[in-house]
Image (tube, helix red, strand yellow):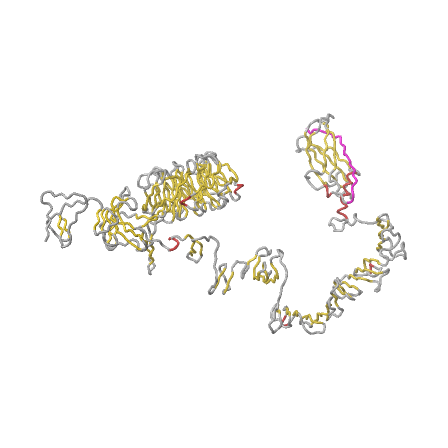
Amino acid sequence: MKKLYSLFIIIILLFSIFDGHAQAPQGIPYQAVARDVNGSVMASQNITLQFSIHDGNATGPVVYQETQSVTTNTLGLFSVNLGQVTPVSGTLATVNWGSGDKFLQVEMDPAGGTSYTDMGTTQLMSVPYALYAGNSSNGWNTTGNSGTNTLDNALGTNDATDLVIKTANFETARLFSNPETGGGLNTPTDRLRLMRSGMAYQKWPMVASFQLGSYEPNLEGRTQMDIALLNGPGVNADNKVMSLQANGNVGIGTTSPTERLDVNGTGKFGPYLKIGTDVAEGYFQNSQDGAYRSLQSGGNQGYWFQNYNGVNTSMYVGLNGAYQNHVGIGHVTPQHTLSVGEASGDQQAVTVRGYSNDGTWKGGAAFGYTQGSVLMGELSGVPTIGGHNANLSAWNNLAINPDGGNVGIGTSNPTEKLDVNGKLKTNEFQLPIGAAFGKILKSDSVGNASWQNSDLSNLISAAPAGELCFQDVGIIQSGGQPNKVVVKDHYAFVANSAANTITVFDFSNPSAMTLSATLAVGSFPQGLAIAGNTLFVTNVNGATMSVVDISNPASPSILTTVATGNGPGAIVIKGNYAYIANVSDNTIGIYDISIPASTSLVNSFASSTVVKDMAITGDYLCYVSLMDQAFVMFNISNPTSPVLTSVSAVYYYPIALAISGNKAYITRTVPPASNSMTIIDISNPSSPAFLGTADFGVYARSVAVVGNIVYVTGEDGVVKGYNVSDPANPTLMNTVSIAGAGTSLATKDNLIFVTLYNTDKLQILRTGCPQSLTIGIDQSVSLTPSLWVPNGDDVYNANTGNVGIGTTTPNRTLDVRGDIAQGQATDSIPSRRIGVMDASSQTAGMEIENTTLDGNYSQKLHFITNHNAIGFGRRLTINEDGNVGIGTTLPVNKLTVAGNTNITGSLGIGITSSNFKLHVAGDDNAIKISGSGNFEQYGHLLTLTRY
């Protein structure tokens, strides 16, 4: 059974006063009390209402309909505004309130709008028609309106009275109801008369009138509509100032214009230009000297700009014939679109002066097809030929082909930025990008050159394998438990896990490395990566990443700290994105680092279990998983959406990864003795292939690759170098002990940086051995290792065999076949010594002493034993006179003995042999015994004989 309801309706009619420019409110207030069929108030109840506006009568067509849901108050009262919701049909703004009656039908449904009950229809009286005032903007305006109804919309009067317009209460304009009667103010002869404001009953201007329509009063009998500006009353040729004809011609000073602009008289354009009345000739008057310049027609051929006397043509414009569309400046036979200068002669033809928008380009003469793409002029004070882009914001000092940016000299098709077909001669040549002291310019296979380090691999295409030497350069204290090092320029950045710091070291002098800065970061820093002037640090225990400004390495500062996953460790960077391995979550986070201070997480994806190290090569992110014992590759050509490419088994817990070219080098923590380093071919990322292994030892913690040499360090406290030119058969080249357990390697040029975890130090090694390079005429290359190795100011020989000089088969540690010379005999040369030194620095040998006494040069030969200082241990001396001293360095006789002499055999004086213990032969006094000493004879040992 359909329920009956009733509404006690109150339509609130609001009146408002608004000016002609205001918008009428598009809404009708409606208020009512809802009651049920028993007359009881429907208090606090949700109801749905449907409103319909009928045109003409209560059942006429619906021109507008809407529904609204409201809640009554405790008295059953509700209020709505019609036109404030999305209508079911029509729009309130388009209801034509000015045409016919309008009726409002109201329907109600308390059940939500599925079945409405008609509550009655009521005619809308005067107030809603106030909305009709809003149509004033749609009826008659200066811009026109497609909604104008000429039957309803009009400006004027309905009776035979004039339309008067006043300002300041004075009549300023009057449209007369009957302009055809009589003369005078109230019997006008014009359809529109303007009055001067403030001057009653006077025409404005006094002698001017404006006529719309034809020249004659009989409008209906004319077929064209002209507009005339008149000077005085009436319509005649004498007072007509301007005529705008229906055919589009405009006449000034003439009643019959034959052209779009027909001027009868002299026209002035500013103070300098006058145009004559002769259509075959116009002239320009110079305001300075009064001279005339003429523009003359050459029939259908062209126009000349000449002096008024008809000579000295300055410009010719061709219209037809041989010079059609050609312009000549200085002559009348232009052979090109623009021809400047005399037909013959040698003069400066074109001078252009002016400024560009930015003020740097002067004299902008532009050439091009659609725009001036090549310019000639003065750029910042320098004569320049240049190219520019469309908005003149970018310049090239020389641009033959600005679209491609290529310049050709001697070629019309340049393929490079500068393409010279011919010889190039220059006093100086500079390629600043990448240049530095000691760099060399190296070309690739297609001729692209770049600055490279001047090491052997860049000097020759295929360097032969040489020796590998390690030299301990320096060591310095870092923070507690350093476990990662990265290098930029001449600075090393070290993460100290136990100290929660980053230390910065200046190694511009590697042998005297200095601490530049210490910066506190998060808890247990472990991963380091550098992009530009920013250092990114992962903090394992803090689950954060510290973003550090290192534009001044001696004063680093934290830009921001970013939350990461749990246990962030390894970090790598490509372009504007950083990838962080969260070992506790087994995820890899991707961070946007394009603005380092605003680094943010953009995505993350699942990884293998405990990712220990990562590397990027091309479009691939690679990592090693400790617990899954795997090498994994992801395609990151879309940096924020990595795609798994391959998973390769790498047994025995891989921990460190390095990539060079298309090879991956992986070290492990608990390997068998024979394969602690694995080499994998990744040239096909979808199917990596095993190549070879090498032995390192237990717990190889870090790996680095330089050319064909792989460096590995670990818990054994050594650094090893492997030759991997044959990846299937890596060979150990050398091993050097370091001052602790190595945890991280970084390389720069020929330096190796090693963090020593258990001794809290950073150590620097220098690699490479001095070698002799031989390049044959057949382009063969060979290296001969040098036997002498520098060590500071000293050199040493690492040879463990014999050294031969003058012999190819030495049988002693030093085997010299030939003379040995030491020093030279000059006054400035001090004593020289040659000898053998034992472990206690005691020397036995010979010394040549150079001395100067009383201006005379002398030289002595000393034989030395048990010598540890100059002048000591000299046992036998031979001076420059041939005297021999024993126990003295100043012998005055052929034999001078200082000290006791014991002869166990025969001593002959003056005789070459004797059977006597002492045999003195000769006629001279043989023996002289003087002094107070006693001479004693024992037995028959002494016989004195005189012959």
Q: Is residue 51 left or right of residue 846?
A: right
Q: Which of 90 and 862 is in front in this view?
A: 862
The boundaries of the magenta stretch are 1-20
Q: How many numbered callouts?
A: 0
> What residue appears at the point 71 percent right and 70 percent down from the top-left corner?
294
The image quarter containing residue 872 is top left
Q: Where is residue 353 in the image (x, y as percent from the top left)?
A: 63, 62
Q: Where is residue 278 in the image (x, y as percent from the top left)?
A: 75, 70
Q: Where is residue 263 in the image (x, y as percent from the top left)?
A: 77, 65
Tell me which secondary structure the magenta stretch mostly adopts: loop
Q: Nearer the viewer, residue 477 or 665?
A: 477
Q: Position of residue 582 (x, y in %)?
A: 45, 37
The image quarter containing residue 253 is bottom right
Vertically, is 702 above or below 215?
above
Q: Is residue 329 left or right of residue 620?
A: right
Vertically, is 945 above or below 588?
below
Q: Which of 782 and 884 is in front in this view?
A: 884
Q: Nearer the viewer, residue 928 or 107?
A: 928
The image quarter containing residue 444 is bottom left
Q: Within the magenta stretch, is there residue 686?
A: no
Which image quadrant: the N terminus?
top right
Q: Can residue 609 be seen in this view?
A: no
Furthest-left residue in view?
940
Q: Can residue 243 be seen in this view?
A: yes
